[in-house]
Amino acid sequence: MTENDTSTSFGKYFIWVAWFLGIALLVFVFQDLLDEQYNPNQDPKLSLQNNGKAQVTLQQNRQGHYVTNGAINGTNVTFLLDTGATQVSIPGHIAETLSLQAGDKYRVQTANGTITVYQTQLNELRIGNIYLYNVAAHINPSMAADEILLGMSALKRVEFSQTGKQLILREQL
């Protein structure tokens, strides 16, 4: 093998590595953009009302949903707000991560049919700077999503109003 063959082989190798790194960088950048489009509220806008109570302003995502980061019992989670859900609904795999205790078993009606869930209680639920305590929820073992449905057992404890593509959550007086 001559010196010219070696440099040609090295050049081809370098081009392949450069292409691979370029594609990997594009995937990383575009995935970040897609994540931001799905959850535009990764760092929700926080403020205080005139009375000193907390307020969180959420932006609607491209699908028309309100998705935001928050926490349950101090552990970061992602919420999908769902006014059609009676309770906060936590996928089984997330409930395990949160070390939630499964209580009584009961059946609920969903858009996909009747399922079995397990009652649980959340010591603390946080959305931005709004804290809710002792929130009723259920564990849904058949739910595979990575988001927690933030149902009315939590939402009824805040005031909320929608204007355009914004949803404002306000701590109740």
Image (tube, grey):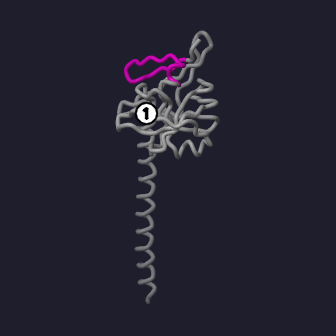
Look at label 1 and name its amino acid.
Val
Q: Quadrant of the N terminus?
A: bottom left
110 lies left or right of 141: left
Q: Residues within 10 Å of mark 1 (few under 14, many from 20)?
A: few
- Residue 17: give x, y in percent of width and height: 45, 67
Residue 13 lies, with reference to residue 143, above or below; the image says: below
- Residue corresponding to mark 1: 108
- Identify the residue at horizontal 60%, vertical 31% (top origin): 122
Q: Nearer the viewer, residue 66 or 31?
A: 66
Q: Quadrant of the C terminus?
A: top right
Q: Nearer the viewer, residue 26 or 109?
A: 109
Tell me the magenta residue range.
154-170
In the picture, residue 73 is in which quadrant?
A: top right
Q: Tell me the element at label 1.
A: strand
- Identify the residue at horizontal 59%, vertical 29% (top origin): 126
- Identify the residue at horizontal 60%, vertical 40% (top origin): 100
